[in-house]
Structures are given as C-alpha cells and as structure tokens.
Amino acid sequence: MGEFELIRQFFQPLAAAGGSSQLLLGPGDDCAIQRVPPGRDLVFSVDTLVEGVHFPERYSPFNLGWRSLAVAASDLAAMGAVPVCFTLALTLPEANEHWLSDFAEGLAKASAAFGITLAGGDTTRGPLTLSIQVHGTVAEGKCLRRSGAAPGDLVCVSGTFGDAGAALPYLDTVKPSPLQKAVLTQYHHPQPRVTLGQQLVGYASAAIDVSDGLLADLQHVLAASGVGARVQVDEVPLSAALQELHGNKAIELALTAGDDYQLCVTISPGQWSRLSEQVRAELTVIGQIEAEPGLRLEGGEEGISIQGFDHFGRTV
Amino acid sequence: MGEFELIRQFFQPLAAAGGSSQLLLGPGDDCAIQRVPPGRDLVFSVDTLVEGVHFPERYSPFNLGWRSLAVAASDLAAMGAVPVCFTLALTLPEANEHWLSDFAEGLAKASAAFGITLAGGDTTRGPLTLSIQVHGTVAEGKCLRRSGAAPGDLVCVSGTFGDAGAALPYLDTVKPSPLQKAVLTQYHHPQPRVTLGQQLVGYASAAIDVSDGLLADLQHVLAASGVGARVQVDEVPLSAALQELHGNKAIELALTAGDDYQLCVTISPGQWSRLSEQVRAELTVIGQIEAEPGLRLEGGEEGISIQGFDHFGRTV
C-alpha cells in the first residue's frame, strides 16, 4: 500500500465520523466548505506541536493524537465556542503504519469527545510536526475575549493547577506510582473545558485557557483589559496528588507550570450570582480585578516566582 | 528585543494591513473571529511547506513568504473563492531578525496582492516548516468542485505549464541567463489565478489548481467526477522560454511537472459560449471530457510519461 493510501485509510474515517451539518465538504477537494449558520460568528485558532519541543521524542502516538486536538480545542473553550471541525497539517519522517494507526486512534477519541470533525489537511514528509486549526462558532458578538475584565470582577478558575507540569519528570518513568500516574494523566490527556466555556458565554467578562501557566495567562487578560488583579495564592486549587508529590513546592508549580488547559475567567459579582449552581461548582474564585495595573499575590510562601513559561511563541 | 517581541514586530503589520471587514478579531486572543456574510459559504485549505522538501535549504525568505501564501491562495482560486484571511503556523530554528524581516516582506507583498489578511498563527521553535491556512468565501452552494465534470465538457487551462518545473536545475545558479530567469520567476513568484477563479463561478463544471502536474491534477478531477478525458497534447500552452530551454522535452515537463499554480477547469460548450471574451482569452481548450474513464493523450511525441508527481501527501 502506498503512503498516500495509508494516510487516506487512517484519516478518512475521522472525516466521516460525527459530521457536523455545517461541514458541507470535507477532505478530498482543493478546499473544505463550512456553512456558518446565520447569527453565528466563526472562531478559529491554530496550534503547532513540534517533536522535542512540545512533546518528547518517541512520544506515544495515541497520546499525541489526543493531546494535539485537546490543546487546540482548549482555545475554542476560551472563546465560549461550540466546536465544529478542524484541519490537520501533519509532517512526519515516514508513513509508519503502526504509528499512524495509534495516532489516528488518539485523534479519533478526542474528535468524538469534543464533537469536532476532520475537515481537511496536508500531509508532508519532514521532521515530526503537527499544526491543528480548530473551527467553532459563537452567537454573533458573544465571544469571550481577553479584553473585557473590569475592576471588581471576580477572577475564577476551573479545575486544579500544576499537575501537568508536575508530570514532566515522570514522562519516561517505566512504572510510575499511583500518584505519579495521576499527574501523568493530566499531561497526556488534558480535558479542555469546552462545555464550561459555552456555559460562561453571557456571564464571563473575559476568558483565557491556561496553557503557559496560571499567572502568565492571567497577565495576558490583565494586559488586554488594561487592568490589574489581586490573587489569593492559597485559594488556587491543587490536586491531592500534586500536594502529596510536591508539598511546599506545589503552589509554585500551580502558579507557573503550563499545559493544564483549564479556564481562567473574570466575572462581575452580579453575573456570578446569576450563574447556575452547577456552573459555579466548576469554578473557584481566586482573586479580584483592580483598576491599578499589575498582578499582586497575597498569601502563600515567601519568594514565589511569578515568571510564566516563555515558550518562544504565542498562539492566537 | 526578545524573540516574542521580534515576531510581533514583523507580523503585527500584516494583521493590520488590508483588514477585511469580515475579520472581527485578528491576532492576540485565544482565537480569531470571522463573520461570514449571509448567503456566503466559508472555504478553507491548509498547505505545509518543509525546508529541504518543498523548498531548498537557505531559500530566500522573501520568496518563501510570497510562495507559501501564493500556493495556499491557489486553492481558493480553484474553488472560485474571494480570499479573506489566513493563519500562519511558523516553526523556525531561531528568530533571526534579517530572515524574519525578509520573510514578512514577501508575505506582506502576497497578502496585498491577493487581498488576504493575517488573522492569527502560532510561532514555535523547531525545523523550518510553515503551514498556511487560507479562508475565502463563495456564494452559497456555488463553489467550484472537482466532481462536476460531465461528458462533452471542454477541458481548459489558464496560463502556461512546465516553467516552474524547468526552473528546478537553476535554483542555485548564481548568474542565470534571461531564459533561465524567466522560468525561475514562475518558480519563485507563482501567480495564483484568484480573479479568474471567481470569474468562472457559475460557468465551470469542475476546477482544480495545478500543483502536482497537469495530468496528475486533471486525473483528480476525472476520478472525482467519474469520467474520462481526451487531451490534445499539442494544445497544452508552453512559454517561449520553456521551448527554448527544453525543445522536445518541453511538453513532458508541461504535462508532469508541478508548482505552476494555474487552473485546470471543465466547462460545457454552452457555458463556454456564455463566458465573456475577456475570460475566454485567459483560457486554452486542451481537450474534452468523455464518459469512458481514463485519460487519453493525442498528438505529441511518442513515449510521454503520464505519471504525476507523487509528493507523499495530499492537500484539501
């Protein structure tokens, strides 16, 4: 079987599965065609993952498939968008059947989990690199942006922080302990908050997904909104596994490590009280927006670094 | 200046320039936002270029900027779409100021030429690789597809063929002759037929842009439409430079070499006669669609290979 056929065999099922009614034409022509429903805006974002930079060499292709789509879908979550479809630009050194099969399986699992269908792509030979562009829609003018935070708004986060960062030393561990396994799962199988993002449309004043570190990403919101914030360090949610593994260092990881893919949003007290109990239960208030620029940390140990992870790049 | 700032400095102007009214939000948030006008379909396509595979090492960054966007815009031309915006996923080994400046200049020139604005992207460190995804719109249901060719339709092409392929031996030539320069220009500065594609909406029954070779790409149309074709090899348009440089071999290059980025379309005789003279003057009839599957070549020298260029991949 030719390489061309091999790729078609593994990726064609992803294009057929799910099948948003918006996707009028999938892979196989010069372009794909999407019909955005009246009254909806298209939102889109591209993320690149490079072997040896964003994931280790010889990384599990199944996990890579899941992770690459999850990371991209997380940007849709941050805008409050309903996922529709994605394109895959895949550069790989050789068309290895086992690798492709496992990668496609991970991608298919994420595709089904987030309700997002393969619309097209480009497969080329070269060093292992993936770029995934995701498309979603939001009611016209209702997108969550980084720029809407206002003084008095509550700073809220979903989930817990620091687990994915804590997993990095164990990526090559042959027999991880149960605690190590717990944080490794957060690294290998991030769960972007796609549903929660949609539930926050009309309530949150600003939103971002935390890929570079909680403080670094919160600072992006502050800069875009022209405001500052005060954060209660002790309120930042930590998993039991992280606290067991890292003790006093847990909070520093939670504040600065990347790859968690939770949401950090700002909500006015009035809107917070209008949110359903179910959605409020998904969020933890960790601070408040202030007019004075800058990020002020309260509580926690002395000497916490507030440097985010600068990965030479940014994502739109 | 940090690498982050350097990249922002060079790419931010591309996002500001032009500025389609459809692009509600460009780079800087988690996603870009496009509002597709009522009655229009969104069409999109991604193309990847890898150093050492799709362009030579140490290739001119200005030419790379032009070429990468031109190649992607050619897919919009093949659908008859009006270009709107694009994303750039750029992976590069280091943020070299001169390289970035020249690359951004080539990209800006192409962006202005094709009327397509930078909407967002991702910049990462790694082996030099670019993925560009272009967005355009077409009136609902009016996209040119590969699948509409019917027996009796004329097979037409724009421009001339084979020049870009003929340029490959001269890419490193220090002082190319005028003839060599002529074909090199086709390789370095392809001119996707964006306007012509739009003019063919409502007339052409099928269309494709010729990136892999005329016969290879025509075969994609035949396969998608479930038809065959007869092609008059002597009718395939050749540039004077190509004929001077390659004599008897010119036609083989024209039929099989890639990278020309002209259009190959099928049009019923009735629609052909309705086309304006101005548009007809842009096209050459080289054959006719037949019910019997397969591609039959007439005229030309004996022993012409009809193998297209299989570059281990396909583009949607």
Image (cartoon, coloured by chain):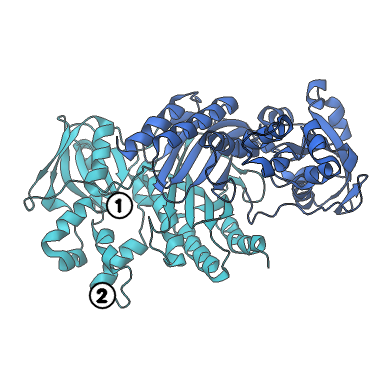
Chain colours: A cyan, B blue
User: Which quadrant of the figure has residue B278?
Assistant: top right
In percent of width and height, residue A233 lies at 13, 49
Residue at 25 percent of width and 76 percent of height: A177
Helix, strand or loop status at disc 1: loop
Q: Which of marks 2 and 1 is nearer the N terminus?
A: 2
Q: Tell me the residue that label 2 is attached to.
A: A178
Callout 1, which amino acid? Gln
Instruction: State yes or no: discs 2 and 1 in contact (Cβ < 8 Å).
Output: no
Q: Considering depth in this image, is B16 or A135 the residue closer to the camera? A: B16
Cα–Cα span, label 2 and label 1: 23 Å
Residue at 63 percent of width and 55 percent of height: B313
Q: Which mark is residue A166?
A: none
For disc 2, the neighbor class at 10 Å (few under 14, some 14 to 19, many from 20) is few
Residue at mark 1: chain: A
For disc 1, the neighbor class at 10 Å (few under 14, some 14 to 19, many from 20) is many
In percent of width and height, residue A141 lies at 41, 31
Q: Considering depth in this image, is B138 or B119 the residue closer to the camera? A: B119
In percent of width and height, residue A104 lies at 52, 63
Report the side of A221 relative to A229 (left or right).
right
In the displayed structure, B308 sits above or below B205; it is below
Residue at mark 2: chain: A
Q: Tell me the residue that label 1 is attached to.
A: A262
